[in-house]
Image: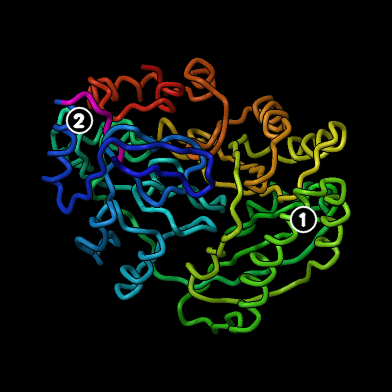
Amino acid sequence: MTRIRRNWARTETFRPALTVAPRSTEQVVLAVRRGLETGHGVKPLGATHSFSGVAATDGIHLDMDRMRGAISIDRERGRATVWGGTRLRELAGILNPHGLALPNMGDIDRQTIAGAIQTGTHGTGLRQRGLAAGVVGATIVTGTGEVLEVDEQHHPELLPAVALGLGALGVIVAVTLQCAPRFLLRAEEAPEPLDAALDDFVERTRSADHFEFFWFPHTEVARTKTNTRLPLDAPLEPLGAIPRLFDEEVMNNQVLGAILAVERLLPPITPRVNRLIAALSSRRSYSDESHRVFVTPRRVRFIEMEYGLPLDAVPAAVRELRDMIERRGHRVSFPVEVRAAAADDLPTSTAYGRESGYVSVHRYWRESDSGYFRDAEDILLAHGGRPHWGKLHTQGVEELRRIYPRLDDFLAIRDRLDPDRVFANPYLDRVLGR
């Protein structure tokens, strides 16, 4: 009997009938054909960092951990082809020696590259699109067991859908990424009044290479982070080993974890604790390799819901969120994160056809939700929000048709590549239909 599997956030539990760890595309094909023959669903599972059930299966689980690393590097065109099971944290070691880097990253790098693109990971920066928009080629095994090369020369009409396919179109065994020349980032982190950060949000996202902020509910303070891209010959001013250990490991993980555990048992103290955290927030500035600045260790488990909104709607939505939290009496110990990304043309992208701002709400994984996520979701939907596929939301296919204008185009491609729904699961049944 196979063991029970859980995702990182412990929001999903499933027991695959069979786990297969392929080493080659041919072995993935065999697993998909076995699923077809036996009636079992087939799902590749990466680093389990999706909060939703997008990758859960009680059928055949593909452990892609043996299909990692570089396949080829095209320095002239700035492209890298890697196996789909490659973790984001491994890409710097692959790309940097060739003078390349990912143009953008989120603040977590534990995901596989296939998982990150298939769920719409985007990072922040209005001058940058999400990771999936940088996919210029992919090798997939479809629901019929066919191996398809999808790029500008082969089936180019499929590329926008395959790049951000929710795992519904096929198993991504390899992916080709359009990279950027290797670069440094200077980070400026500072506490600011929340209203000031909201008033200037659109302007600052347009003027900065990368801008975001975190806000602890029950306070009026935002912690802003502005990243500026620098050439490789710029002076390096990295965080020292002791400050990095203290800030990122001790304070952001160990101390925060202890505080959240206490707040879970004593919810009334949450506003006071949040105000103390905000009062202790300080300024810091540093510069380093891009991947070291983008990424922050996240060891405290949490659950998350995120919506992409029209950029101009973000300030009003966050203010409504603040008012709702106090009016409804929610006690929210985890911060709200606010970011932005450029428009793209991928039919299932939260940023399809529009510059987008992102509002993420979180809870400590052991806390009871008490309706906070649903109340927040109502506000974000009212402002034209689109849910992130890898994070929690309650929308179904009919609601999603209204907010993803090309969803039916995507569903037609699904019918073509997975007619027997080998890659279906309860989550995809809900958001894409059967």
Image position of 41 with respect to 192: above or below: above
* Residue 91 drawn at (x, y percent): 36, 64
The image quadrant that residue 147 belongs to is top left
Q: Amino acid at mark 1?
A: Val
* Residue 330 drawn at (x, y percent): 80, 37
Which residue lies most toward the front here? 1
Q: Which quadrant of the figure contains the C terminus? A: top left
Tell me what residue is drawn at x 15 percent, y 51 percent.
Answer: 24
**Would you say the residues marked 1 and 2 are in contact, meaning their CB atoms lie under 8 Å apart?**
no
Tell me what residue is drawn at x 23 percent, y 22 percent.
Answer: 416
Image position of 160 with respect to 294: above or below: above
Tell me what residue is drawn at x 31 percent, y 54 percent.
Answer: 177
* Residue 415 drawn at (x, y percent): 27, 20
Q: Amino acid at mark 2?
A: Gly
Q: Which residues are magenta?
A: 38-44
Give whichever of 347, 300 is nearer the camera: 300
User: Would you name the residue on which mark 2 appears?
Assistant: 35
Tell me what residue is drawn at x 66 percent, y 65 percent.
Answer: 252
On whether residue 223 falls in the magenta region, the answer is no
User: Would you name the residue on which mark 1 appears?
Assistant: 262
Q: Which quadrant of the figure contains the N terminus? A: top left
Image position of 168 with respect to 125: above or below: above
- Dot 1 or dot 2: first in sequence order is 2
The crowd level at tag 2 (other Cα within 10 Å; few <14, some 14-19, many 20+) is: many
Give the label, 1 or 2, closer to the camera.
1
* Residue 343 drawn at (x, y percent): 50, 40
| Element on which disc 1 rests | helix
